[in-house]
Image (tube, helix red, strand yellow):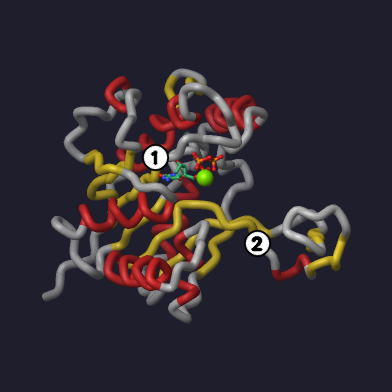
Amino acid sequence: MKAAPKHWVVLPAAGAGRRFGSAVPKQYLPLGDRRVIEHSIAVFIEHPLIAGCIVALSPGDEWWQETAYVDHPAVVRVPGGAERFDSVANALAALANQAAADDWVLVHDAARPCLTTADLDRLLAALIDEPVGALLAVPMHDTVKSAEEAFGARVERTLPRQQLWRAFTPQAFRLGQLRDALAYCRAERMAITDDASAMEQLGLRPLLIEGRADNIKITRPEDLPLAEFFLEQQRRQEQR
Ligand code: CTP
Ligand code: MG
C-alpha cells in the first residue's frame, strides 16, 4: 500500500525587508513575547500533521541563531537566494532528499506571523483528494483600479471585484509539481511573486480557501503594531 503523503513546510525568510526599512530584517523583529519568525514557525511545529520545516535564510543571516528554533530537530536551515522564488526553490531542493515527490509542501512567508491553527486546519483539510493544491486567500472588499502605467496615477479602469481574491500563505502543492513549476518559470524568466502563480503557468488551477483577513504579511512599519493587535485578539478569543 502506498504511504499517505506527508506535509512539509517551507518558510522563505531570506528577504532584507527593503519596504519595511529596519536595520534588523522584519522577520526578526520582536512581536509580543517572541520574534516575528518564531510566531510564523510555531503554528506549524505545534501541529501534529506537519513532518518538518525548512527555513531559507540569507547567507549573511546573524539573527537565526538567536531564535528558539535554532536547535529544533524538525527545523532545518538552507541558504536562501536573490528572490523569494530562489529561496523557495533552494528549500525544495533540500527537501527532496527526505520527502517524496507527491508529499505536500506548504510554503509560508516568514513575515506572516498571525496564521491561526484553524486556518491551517482548513487548508490541510482541503488537500485531501485535491489534485492540484490550495492556498489561503481573502475575497477583495475594496474597489480595485488598474492604472494606465505601472506606477502611474491615472485610472485606466475598474476591475470587477467579484472575482478578485488576495492571495495569502500558506500555499500547498505537491513537492514534485512545485519544483517543476518553479523550474519552468525560471527557464522562461517569469517574475512570480507567489507559488500558486508558478503552478498557474503550468496550466493548473489551485483551489482558493477563504482564510482570515488578519493573516497579514508584515511589509511596512505600520503592519507590525497591527500584527501585535491581531495576535492579542486571537489570544483573547483562544484562537492560538
Ligand atoms: N524572501 C526570501 N528570499 C528573498 C526575498 C524574500 O526568502 N530573496 C522571503 C521574505 O523573508 C519574506 C517572504 O519571502 O518572509 C515574503 O517576501 P517580502 O514580504 O517581499 O519580504 P522582503 O523581500 O524581505 O521585503 P521587501 O520586498 O520589502 O524587500
Ligand atoms: Mg520582497
Judged from the image, the secondary structure of the residue bearing numbered disc 1 is: loop
Pick the front one: 21 or 209: 21
Q: Which amino acid does label 1 sit on?
A: Ala
Residue 178 in percent (x, y) is at 35, 67
1 or 2: mark nearer the eye = 1
Residue 193 in percent (x, y) is at 52, 57
Residue positioned 52% across, 35% down in the render: 17
State the residue lying farthest toward the right: 154
Pick the front one: 101 or 28: 28
Q: Distance between the residues labelled 1 and 2?
A: 26 Å
Determine whether, in the image, residue 6 is placed left or right of residue 235. left
Residue 141 in percent (x, y) is at 76, 55
Q: Residues within 10 Å of mark 2 (few under 14, many from 20)?
A: some
Residue positioned 32% across, 71% down in the render: 180
Ligand 1 neighbours mark 1 (CB distance < 8 Å): yes
Q: Earlier in the sequence, mark 1 or mark 2?
A: 1
* 231 lies above or below 188: above
Q: What residue type is labelled 2?
A: Trp
Q: Mark 1 points at which residue?
A: 14
Please say whether residue 153 is visible from this viewpoint. Answer: yes
* 154 lies above or below 185: above
Residue positioned 19% across, 28% down in the render: 71
Please say whether residue 46 is visible from this viewpoint. Answer: no
Pick the front one: 13 or 35: 13
Give the label on residue 209, or none.
none
Residue 214: quarter of image: top right
Judged from the image, the secondary structure of the residue bearing numbered disc 2 is: strand
Residue positioned 42% across, 37% down in the render: 40
Residue 185: quarter of image: bottom left
Give the label on residue 165, or none.
2
Residue 176 in percent (x, y) is at 27, 69
